[in-house]
């Protein structure tokens, strides 16, 4: 029946963004019989979830949720995936949209077996964006060890160089193709779901918190990568300046969030993320002192509240209700002094720690560059869903700050909205 319904609808669905929301929308629509085109700007699917060590509510590793979704995508002939692809323009109306998609060259074709010989031969190194620039990788690279599609990427930096020749000679499978060019393809679809996700707020814009000035101040997403076994330190949490095992760490909550000069809204996930991060630290350093500076701690829902109460039982985790006013580095040691006023006692606190983690907020990707379609946004750059008009919808963090569970629920709803558009037209 689902297949007949899809045939009667006579349309396809475009999903923009291959993070957890985009994957869910794609699979929910395709598995009831609809043709879906999934477009992702990165060389891999999985989005921000793939960068986490664990995610709520069960503290699962990314492989737990992503691998089965990748298998479902691979096995479903109704799904066509475009990676390294961006939407150039969307014209039309609900039921009939003309979409132009720009495809960037990967310089690696379907013959790739992930043998890694091209990376071995390559001498040029580039910054690893997946790890937020905390390490270097070869210019011929697999984005990360669970990347899907499982194909290498050649950086355009080495095109025309000796390194390009080395890579070509090293490949035994004729998988490298330097004749690949950027191209534009056009599709006609009946509905579009924008699952364009979020970016960590740029912590260097927060003048008083020292990010970019002091090496031992990092962001929450950087800590995720440090704690991940496929991260720059193979899962060992070490402070950046000297690879020391930190004995004391401070978390600064609402770093840029709930601040009229930066992000005026609550980013929803930051409090729980920091509480989760304390479990990472505690696993590696049972005696480390952890200080959490907060305005309000928000644990939405009974399960999260229970998690929060469990963390509070740790005698080496100290909660300080107070907004951090400034940070400074101690000359010679690289330690950081965090200054705040305790909102309960009124006391001015100066706490020395070996490392600081900024709980930076969640900013919609569309806030930086508006999407090439007729969409409405709120003042913070989140897409406003116009259900009366229909046709185009925002899912997950493109619509509002959300965790993985909420994003999945929302994405399922947006898949249904997209299907309803096709059925009604």
Image (cartoon, rainbow, N blue to C red):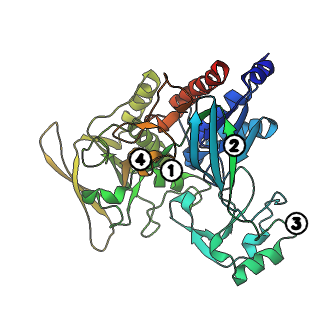
Closer mark to the observer between disc 3 and disc 1: 3
Mark 3 or mark 1, earlier in chain: 3
Q: Quadrant of the C terminus?
A: top right
For the residues labelled 3 and 4, the Cα–Cα distance comes to: 42 Å
Q: Which residue is mark 4?
A: 367
Number of on-image labels: 4
Which one is in front, 371 or 315? 371
Which one is in front, 80 or 389? 389
Mark 1 or mark 4, earlier in chain: 1
SS category of the residue bearing label 1:
helix
Mark 2 or mark 3, earlier in chain: 3
Closer mark to the observer between disc 2 and disc 1: 2
SS category of the residue bearing label 3:
loop
Eyeballing the image, is 384 above or below 178?
above
Regarding residue 130, the answer to whether it shows in the image is yes
Mark 2 or mark 4, earlier in chain: 2
Q: Quadrant of residue 14?
A: top right
Q: Position of residue 208 (x, y in %)?
A: 24, 58
Q: Is residue 17 left or right of residue 213?
A: right
For the residues labelled 1 and 4, the Cα–Cα distance comes to: 23 Å
Closer mark to the observer between disc 3 and disc 4: 4
Mark number for residue 187? 2
Mark 3 or mark 4, earlier in chain: 3
**Contact, CB < 8 Å: mark 3 with mark 4?**
no
Question: Which residue corresponds to the image point at 45% horizontal and 61% vertical from the top-left?
Answer: 245
For the residues labelled 2 and 4, the Cα–Cα distance comes to: 26 Å
Eyeballing the image, is 154 above or below 340?
below
Q: Which residue is mark 1?
A: 224
Eyeballing the image, is 354 above or below 309?
below
Q: Which residue is mark 3?
A: 173
Mark 2 or mark 1, earlier in chain: 2
């Amino acid at each position: 029946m689902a297949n007949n319904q899809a045939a009667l609808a006579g349309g396809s669905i475009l999903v923009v963004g291959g993070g957890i929301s985009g994957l869910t929308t794609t699979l929910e629509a395709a598995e009831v019989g609809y043709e879906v085109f999934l477009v992702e700007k990165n060389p891999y699917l999985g989005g921000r979830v793939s960068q986490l060590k664990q995610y709520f509510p069960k503290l699962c590793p990314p492989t737990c949720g992503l691998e089965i979704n990748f298998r479902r995508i691979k096995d479903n002939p109704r799904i066509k995936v475009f990676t390294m692809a961006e939407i150039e323009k969307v014209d039309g109306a609900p039921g009939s949209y003309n979409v132009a998609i720009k495809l960037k060259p990967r310089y690696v074709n379907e013959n790739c077996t992930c043998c890694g010989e091209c990376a071995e031969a390559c001498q040029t190194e580039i910054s690893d964006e997946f790890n937020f620039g905390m390490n270097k990788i070869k210019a011929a690279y697999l984005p990360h060890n669970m990347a899907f599609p499982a194909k290498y990427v050649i950086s355009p930096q080495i095109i025309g160089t000796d390194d390009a020749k080395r890579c070509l000679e090293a490949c035994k499978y004729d998988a490298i193709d330097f004749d690949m060019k950027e191209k534009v393809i056009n599709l006609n679809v009946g509905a579009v779901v924008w699952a364009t996700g979020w970016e960590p707020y740029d912590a260097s814009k927060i003048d008083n918190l020292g990010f970019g000035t002091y090496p031992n101040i990092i962001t929450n997403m950087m800590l995720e990568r440090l704690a991940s076994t496929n991260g720059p330190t193979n899962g060992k949490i070490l402070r950046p300046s000297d690879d020391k095992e930190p004995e004391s760490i401070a978390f600064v909550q609402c770093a840029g969030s709930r601040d009229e000069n930066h992000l005026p809204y609550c980013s929803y996930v930051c409090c729980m993320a920091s509480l989760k991060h304390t479990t990472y630290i505690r696993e590696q350093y049972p005696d480390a002192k952890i200080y959490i500076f907060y305005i309000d701690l928000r644990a939405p829902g009974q399960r999260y509240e229970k998690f929060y109460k469990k963390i509070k039982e740790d005698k080496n985790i100290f909660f300080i209700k107070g907004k951090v006013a400034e940070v400074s580095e101690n000359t010679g040691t690289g330690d950081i002094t965090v200054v705040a006023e305790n909102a309960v006692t009124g006391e001015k606190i100066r706490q020395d720690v070996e490392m600081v983690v900024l709980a930076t907020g969640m900013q919609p990707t569309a806030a930086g560059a508006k999407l090439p379609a007729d969409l409405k946004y709120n003042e913070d750059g989140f897409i406003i869903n116009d259900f009366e008009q229909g046709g185009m919808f925002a899912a997950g963090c493109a619509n509002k700050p959300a965790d993985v569970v909420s994003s999945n629920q929302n994405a399922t709803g947006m898949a249904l909205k997209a299907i309803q558009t096709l059925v009604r037209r």
